[in-house]
Image (spheres, rainbow, N blue to C red):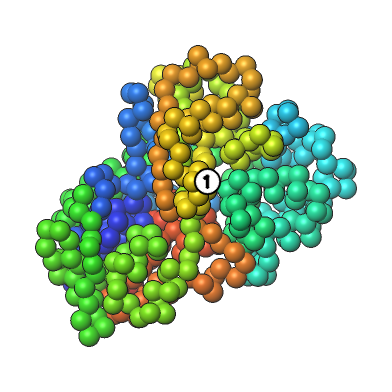
Amino acid sequence: MAHIVVLGAGAMGLAAAYRALCLGHRVTLLEAGAEPGGMAAHFDFGGVSIERYYHFVCKSDAPTFALMAELGLADRMRWRATSMAYHIGGKLHRWGDPVSLLKFPLLTLVEKIRYGTLMFTSTKVNSWAALEHTSAKDWIEGWCGKRVYETLWKPLFDLKFYQHADNVSASWIWTRIRRIGRSRKSLLQEELGYIEGGTQTLVDALIRAITEKGGDIRLATPATRVLTHDNRVTGVATADGVINADHVISTIPTPLVSHLIPDLPPASRAAYDAIENIGVVCVLLKLKRSVTPHFWVNIVNPHATVPGIIEFTNLRAVPSGETIVYVPFYMPTELDLWRRPDDTFIAEAMASVRLVNPDIAPSDLIEATLGRLKHAQPVCPPGFQAKIPPIQTPIDGLQIADTCFYYPEDRGISESVRLGQEMASRVG
């Protein structure tokens, strides 16, 4: 069978390597970082093993469940009743179910009916093609009216997408609504899941399985160039030498592709270069007490610098009983904001938490840290599907995908698993 070199040991790369080995191929997995897992990797947060970038599981995440069963992890899934809220007008309002919508004081009855109809319809529709050339702004305004968009959505989009805020794909936001909307215990109760031990449980199981099947995992070994001859991939160059290959599966971010694979046709390199990404500075706070009873709180406030906070321990409690909150700052990485010191982001994260709950005192902060990711969120405008290059490149034996190839689905473990396994299965 073929020798496949997989670039990137995030969830997609791990899934691709594992599936390729199951199909009988020989696999070398290269990871630029010192540890596998990518955005799913854990770190030690004052004695707590936790993801640097938060993850959760929805009931529609079938590829995750199938892979867990295959790896003997089916009994490690846990489900928990969760909720979300809006902090708007200086008050916290539960959100995400019909009763909360009817009680929400900042919309008229007609707006509530129109909004509820949009949300309900979004969970029932299975095709996104009709929305592909529509912006989320136009879609939401068309269903609910301009005031609903400007009250509930625009402030969040502004703080996540900046200059792109009014030109985000309706297809992309619809799939997010549908995924969460379909992960419910009942009409009134959202239910999200997590893997016992966190995403590291799945990462570790994949590493074990890859190793047991003879896969060669090389950490802290970035690829420096994908090599080709006569329009056919021949290998991958690293600082340690060349690794010959029959096939290469790249899962690195698309902005890095042109530099890594200069033998691609100019039109292909231009297509990868045209895909924009938003960066994230994700602050983690460990607190002595809970901020709210909700997993996710959207923040609409003229003084807010983030679109929301995620109280992760309202999904997955930690043994210490402390509260862990993620505060993600999304922004284009060319802005001066990106280069601010860590302490500035941590101070603003605490300010955001105290905006939601003024009773949280500075003395409630036990520990804080953060991660920076330059290519965290692809910018998906209307018509984005046509801008994504084919996974199979014009170079024989070379497949390329990253998180933007999940479109219209958003980033997530399930989509990583699905696409990684599909790429491995395409190798003849």
41 relative to 231 in the view: left or right: right
Residue 64 against residue 344 in the figure, above or below: below
The C terminus lies in which quarter of the figure? Answer: bottom left
Q: Quadrant of residue 46?
A: top left
Residue indicated by mark 1: 330
The N terminus lies in which quarter of the figure? Answer: bottom left
Residue 411 against residue 94 in the figure, above or below: below
Percent x, y of residue 362 = 52, 17
Which residue, as the protein is rendered here, is positioned at the far front? 336
All told, the count of numbered labels is 1
Of residue 253 and residue 410, the one placed in the foreground of this image is: 253
Which residue, as the protein is rendered here, is positioned at the far top? 363
Q: Identity of the amino acid at label 1?
A: Tyr
Residue at the image point whose x is 59% and y is 38% from the top: 305
118 relative to 352 in the view: left or right: right
Residue at the image point whose x is 34% and y is 37% from the top: 42
- Work out whether residue 226 can be spotted: yes
Q: Quadrant of residue 392?
A: bottom left
- Work out whether residue 80 can be spotted: no
Residue 241 against residue 90 in the figure, above or below: below
Which residue, as the protein is rendered here, is positioned at the far left? 241
Under tag 1, what secondary structure?
strand
260 relative to 164 in the view: left or right: left
Percent x, y of residue 138 = 73, 61
Percent x, y of residue 35 = 26, 44
Residue at the image point whose x is 11% and y is 63% from the top: 241
Percent x, y of residue 128 = 63, 65
Residue at the image point whose x is 59% and y is 64% from the top: 381
Question: Is the residue marked by circle 1 packed among few (<14), some (14-19), or many (20+) residues within 10 Å?
Answer: many
